[in-house]
Image (cartoon, grey):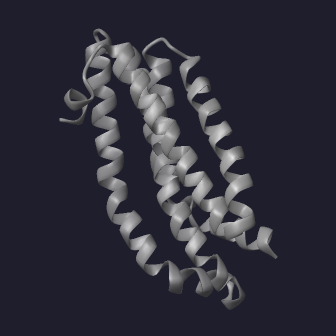
């Protein structure tokens, strides 16, 4: 039962995949073609901002309508998946950012760094699953995913800043 609920929660959270997959495909050649690493980092920052700007309204709407939409689409017996789906919607935003950042690092000439960041995410996931699932069930699994994807974003953003030789504040602006 728990696995079925979690699968539905994951399916409901897949709303960002097409947007961020498209951005990840576009950012790779644009980063590779940039004149220098600093310009490449500015390209990356533009695509990250675009992804967040386009996805923020969808994120908010998905969280608000999830209590009604998920049971309407999958059936009332899946009401128990709503909270996990809401957490996974936020996690999907980070997962999408990871796709863009990973391809950005590849475009900057560091294809191994996304794997290092994903390794951090893997360790985070395993540790958190052992801690959170016994206490919170599928909500714990969703929280573990959120934290793991967020940690990968932080690691990859740190790599981009170091590789490009810029400050994080410069990229955010």
Residue located 61% across and 61% down the image: 142
Quarter assignment of residue 167 = top left
Q: Residue furthest bottom?
A: 76
- Left or right, 148 with respect to 173, comes to right
The quadrant the C terminus occupies is top left
Q: Residue furthest right?
A: 1
Q: Is residue 49 above or below residue 15?
A: above
- Left or right, 155 with respect to 141, comes to left
Residue 101 in view here: no
Q: Is residue 40 above or below residue 24?
A: above
- Nearer-the-camera pick, 116 or 14: 116
Q: Is residue 32 above or below residue 157?
A: above
Q: Is residue 43 above or below residue 35?
A: below
Residue located 54% across and 45% down the image: 149
The quadrant the N terminus occupies is bottom right
Residue located 52% across and 54% down the image: 92
Residue 80 in view here: yes
- Nearer-the-camera pick, 162 or 55: 162
What percent of the width, then of the height, locates residue 101?
A: 45, 32
What percent of the width, then of the height, locates residue 119?
A: 64, 30
- Nearer-the-camera pick, 97 or 130: 130
Total marks shown come to 0
What percent of the width, then of the height, locates residue 93?
A: 46, 52
Residue located 56% across and 29% down the image: 117
Quarter assignment of residue 104 = top left
What percent of the width, then of the height, locates residue 53?
A: 29, 52
- Left or right, 11 with respect to 90, comes to right
């Amino acid at each position: 039962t728990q696995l079925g609920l979690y699968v539905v929660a994951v399916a409901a959270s897949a709303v960002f995949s097409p947007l961020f997959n498209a951005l990840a495909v576009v950012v790779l050649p644009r980063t590779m073609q940039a004149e220098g690493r600093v310009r490449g980092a500015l390209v990356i920052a533009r695509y990250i901002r675009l992804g967040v700007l386009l996805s923020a309204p969808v994120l908010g709407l998905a969280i608000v309508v999830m209590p009604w939409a998920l049971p309407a689409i999958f059936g009332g017996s899946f009401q128990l998946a709503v909270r996990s789906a809401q957490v996974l919607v936020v996690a999907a935003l980070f997962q999408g950012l990871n796709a863009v950042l990973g391809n950005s690092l590849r475009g900057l000439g560091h294809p191994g760094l996304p794997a290092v960041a994903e390794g951090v995410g893997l360790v985070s996931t395993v540790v958190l699953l052992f801690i959170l699932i016994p206490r919170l069930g599928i909500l714990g699994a969703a929280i573990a995913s959120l934290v793991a994807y967020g940690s990968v974003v932080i690691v990859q953003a740190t790599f981009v800043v170091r590789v490009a030789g810029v400050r994080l504040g410069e990229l955010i602006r």
